[in-house]
Amino acid sequence: MSTSERHVADSHDLIRVHGARENNLREVSVELPKRRLTVFTGVSGSGKSSLVFATIAAESQRMINETYSAFVQGFMPTMARPDVDLLDGLTTAIIVDQERMGGDVRSTVGTATDVGALLRILFSRLGTPHVGSAKAFSFNVASISGSGAVTVEKGGRKIKERREFEIVGGACPRCEGRGNVSDFDLTALYDDSKSIAEGALTIPNYSVDGWYGRIFANSGFFPGDKPIRTFTTPQLDALLYKEPTRIKVDGVNVTFEGLIPRIEKSFLAKDREAMQPHIRAFVDRAIVFRTCPDCDGTRLSELARSSKIKGISIADACAMQINDLASWVRDLDEPSVAPLLTSLRETLDSFVEIGLGYLSLDRPAGTLSGGEAQRTKMIRHLGSSLTDVTYVFDEPTVGLHPHDIARMNDLLLRLRDKGNTVLVVEHKPETIVIADHVVDLGPRAGTDGGQVVYEGTVAGLRSSGTLTGRHLDDRARIKESVRTPNGALEIRGADSHNLQGVDVDVPLGVLTVITGVAGSGKSSLIHGSVAGRPGVVVVDQGAIKGSRRSNPATYTGLLEPIRKAFAKANGVKPALFSANSEGACPNCNGAGVVYTDLAMMAGVATTCEVCEGRRFDSSVLEYRFGGRDISEVLAMPVAEAEKFFGAGEARTPAAHRILERLADVGLGYLTLGQPLTTLSGGERQRLKLAVNMGEKGRIYVLDEPTTGLHLADVEQLLALLDRLVDSGLSVIVIEHHQAVMAHADRIIDLGPGAGYDGGRVVFEGTPAELVADASTLTGRHLAAYVAG
C-alpha cells in the first residue's frame, strides 16, 4: 500500500445517526464531523436534547456500561437503547449538563470538586500542630472512640481480646458539620398561659379533641389541667424531650414521645416543598436556623481549626475567594508535597480561568445556579489528557454575561483543538457563530418539530430561511419611551454574600432588569432583600419535582376543574377521571405502559394491551364531555384545549384561565398529558411561570427567563412581560440577554466585577442612559449589541 493511500482506521471521521425517533424526533438522520464543534439550534421543544442527550450521548454511555461484567452492571443504573435505526462512529461521551448540584446540606464547592480532598491532605502533611490524617480536617467525619471485648477465631479456637479504636474527625460536635443549628421557638409550639386540656398546644393536628391532644393531656408525665408555665423542670422536659415510652390512654396502648422529637420525625423529615401550606407555615414559624456558635459556621471542630499553614487554617482557606486561595497556594514551596501542590494549583487556576474565581470552597453546592454548576463540572475536563472524546454541553452560556460568553467560547474551542468532538445545544448567537457545523431542528416545537431543517455551515444557516437563520442577526432597539414608576421597593444596607451595604430603590409598576457579570451579586440582592416580602412571587430555575405520572395538567391544577366538569356532566365521582386514582386501568395501574425489570439489563416498557396506552379503565372512557373522553382531552395540545374549554358545551372557565396562561408563556404546543420528565429546561421554567401567574402577588421576580428560549421566542417573552406590567404588576427580571435589557424601563447594573470586586450598584437608569454612559461592562456590550 502506497503512503498516499489513506489508512482504513482514518476513515471513521463521522458520527452517523439514522432513523432517530426518541420523544418527538421524526426519523432524524444526521452525520456529524468528529473533532469539530457542532452546535444544535432550534426552538425550545424542537428535539435538540432528544437528539443530542437522549440518543447520541445515551447510547454512548449505555455501550460503555455494557463493557463491565454483569455483576458490576447490577449496581449501575440501567439504560434502555434509544429508539434509533443506526448509530455509528460513537466515541466516549462526557455530559456536562445544567443539573443543579446536590442540595445536600453537607455538599459544598470544595466537596463537589477535588479541591476539598487535596486541601485536607495538604493540611494533614504541612499543618502545625499536626492533628491527624486528612479525616481530621473533614466536616463529614465525626470524632469517635471506643473499646470493648471482641471474639476472634484463631486456629479453630475462639479467643476473646480487648480492642480499642479512635477516629479523629473534623466535624464540629455542636452542629455535626452542618455549619448551622436549629432551635425551636417554644412560643410557636404552645401557649404557656393555658393548660393542655384548654388547647395550649398550637401545633397543626394537635387539637384538644384530636388523638395527639388526648395523649398529651392524659400521659401522666405532667398535669394536663394546669398552665404549662407552672410545670416543674422535669415536667417541662418530659413535655418537650421525653424519649418514646409506651403508655395506656383511654384503655388503648400508645407511644408517648416529647414534642420536639415528634415534630422532627413527622414534619422535619419531609422536604419543605412537599409540605401542606399550613404545615410549611408552622415549620417556618417554629424553627429558627442560626450559625453554629461553636464553629462560627465553618463546620469544623476546634482541633481542625487549630492546625495552620503560614497562619492560615483550613477554615480560613475554604472561606477565601478562590482567586485569592490560588495565589496563596502558589506561594507555598514545599518539595515534600510538590505533586499535590501542582495538582491543587492547576485546579484552582481552572476555576479562575472559567470565570468562577469569585466563589469560595465553603459555598454550599445547592446554592450554585445552573450555569455555575455546569462550569464547575467543566473544571475536571479542562486539564484532562484525554483526546477523541465527545463532550456534550447543554447551553453552556446560561447565566453568563456577554462579557463572560467570549471566555466560554474560548474554552469550547480549546476542548475541540485538543482533538475532541464538541456537541453544544445552544440559543445564543455569540456561540452559534463559532460553530464548525450547525444542525438546526424544527420547524417548530413538540409535534410540529423533530425534523432537521438545516445542516451545514453558519454562513449557510444565515441564508437558509429557517426560523433560526432568519433571527440569527436580530438586534433589539433601545426602547424609545419608558414607563414612569408608581412607587419603589426600598433596599437598605444589603450585605448578603458579596454585597457591600447596597442601598437601592427598585421601581414599582415598571419592567426592571437587574444585570451584571456572573458573581456580581444580582441573585444575592434579589433573593436576599426582595424575595419573601409580602406580595412578591419568585419564579426561579429550580427543578420541578414530578414523576412520569406527572404532567402539565396535574402540575398546574388544570386536571381538577376538568375532572369536576366530566363528573358533573356524567353524574359520577371526579376520582374516576384520574389515572392515578379510581379511573386507572387495572392492568398498568394508570401508567399506560407495563414495565418489566430485567435486573442488570435495561428494563422493557411495553404499551399496555388493555388500555392501549390511554391509561384509563375502559368503563371510564365511555363517559364523555363536549364529545370527547378524558384520554382524548389529555392528548390535546394546550392551544386546542384552550379553544375547546373556552366556548360551546365544553365551556369551563376555571380550566380556560389556566390554559390561557400556558398559551401566554409559549407552551401552546405541549399536550396536557405529556410527562413532566420529558420537558426541556426552558419548558419547565415557563410552566412554573404560568402557575405563578395565577397567584395574587403584585411583584413578580423572574430569574433569567430567557434560559432555553430560542431567538424567536424572546420576542414573545418580551410581549408577555409587557402584558404583566400593563395589567398593573411590577416585574423584576434578573437577566443577561441584551434584548431584554434594551426593552427594560429601568436597569440596575451591579459590579464592576465578580466576588469582592462586585457587590456594588454601578449604574441605575434607563437603557438609553446606560448605552450613553458606556462606563460599565454591561453598558459597553449593550451599546455594541444595539449598534449591531
Image (cartoon, rainbow, N blue to C red):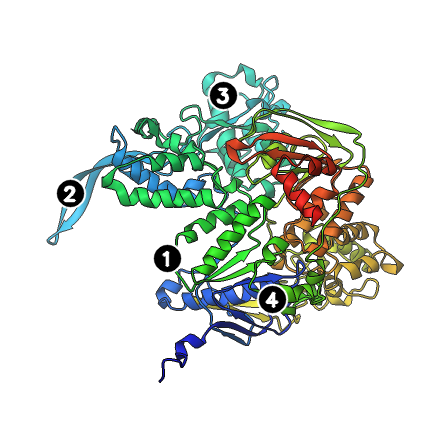
**Closer to the camera: disc 2 or disc 4?**
4
Q: Earlier in the sequence, mark 3 or mark 4?
A: 3
Mark 3 crowd level (few <14, some 14–19, many ≥20, 10 Å Cα): some
Mark 2 crowd level (few <14, some 14–19, many ≥20, 10 Å Cα): few
Q: Which residue is mark 4?
A: 457
Q: Which residue is mark 1?
A: 385
Residue type at tag 1: Ser
Measuring from the top left, give residue 315's x and y in whole percent. 38, 31
Q: Which residue is mark 2?
A: 160
Q: Earlier in the sequence, mark 1 or mark 2?
A: 2
In what element is the residue under mark 1? loop
**Closer to the camera: disc 3 or disc 4?**
4
222 is higher (above) or lower (below) than 591: above
| Residue 691 visible, this orientation | yes
Q: Which residue is mark 3?
A: 236
Quarter location, residue 320 = top left
